[in-house]
Image: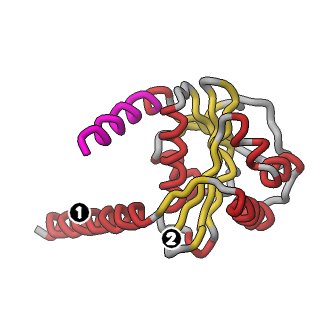
Amino acid sequence: DRMEQVLGERELYDRIAARIKKRQYDAVGIIEFEPALAKYFKSLNYEWLQKYHKVEPTDKKLLEDPEGQIISKGGAVIFARLDNETVGTGALIKHDDSTYEIAKMAVAEKWRGRQAGNKLTTTLIDRARKAGAERIFLETSPNMIPAISLYKKLGFVNCENIIPPRYERESITMMLSPQNIKTKGKKNEKRSSER
């Protein structure tokens, strides 16, 4: 009886936690890049880079000119908003017609744990799928344990480098499995057509 009670309490806790996360996820607004927001793309990424690593030339190139280096080449830069604040950002970099990279993901430290990173990542995955991606990958630091956990929950797996290394800092490459690119894209299309 005690075991069943404990399991019941755990199930109740899990259901409540899932509802809270869903509310937090729904509360995150996603907005498109506009020149006035470029400063957030830079400052949010500089915040975590300077805390855990250093800003390298490749970082500067992307962060100083997101329009020229990312958007004009078929990619995207988006932002997460909570309580009328820009709290996070992320980019989708097009490497070729079938290969896209999720990059420059950053959420301000005080807003972490509120599902902004999750919403940014899923939004970028959906954009890559709609663009016809057959490979979606990202590079992250092995020190970023919460980010790696999120990526694994979304279906990313560790893989070999897809492009030549660009950073001095240690990084791991993760790729969304081809099965997840196809199946989840179809499920999302079905859900949106039902609405």
Amino acid bearing label 1: Glu
| Comes first in the chain, label 2 or label 1 | 1
Q: Nearer the viewer, residue 64 or 32?
A: 32
**Left of 123 or right of it: where is 135?**
right
**Residue designated by label 1:** 11
Badge 2 marks a residue whose secondary structure is: strand
Check the image and name the residue furthest to the front: 35
User: Gap between marks 2 and 1, in whole Å?
Assistant: 29 Å
In the rendered view, tell whether residue 10 sits above or below residue 162. below
Mark whose residue sits in front, 2 or 1: 2
Magenta region includes residue 173: no
**Residue designated by label 2:** 82
**Left of 86 or right of it: where is 11?**
left
Q: Quadrant of the N terminus?
A: bottom left
Q: Residue at x 61, y 36 (%)?
A: 137
Query: On residue 107, which mark appears?
Result: none
- Tell me the crowding category of disc 2: few under 14, some 14 to 19, or many 20 or more residues within 10 angstroms, Cα based: some
Q: Main secondary structure of the magenta part?
A: helix
Rendered image coloring scheme: secondary structure
Q: Position of residue 168 (x, y in %)?
A: 86, 46
**Left of 145 or right of it: where is 179?**
left
Magenta region includes residue 186: yes
Segment tinted magenta in the rendering: 181-195
Q: Position of residue 122 (x, y in %)?
A: 48, 47
Q: Quadrant of the C terminus?
A: top left
**Left of 183 or right of it: where is 29?**
right
Q: Residue at x 46, y 64 (%)?
A: 28
Badge 1 marks a residue whose secondary structure is: helix
Q: Position of residue 87 (x, y in %)?
A: 59, 68
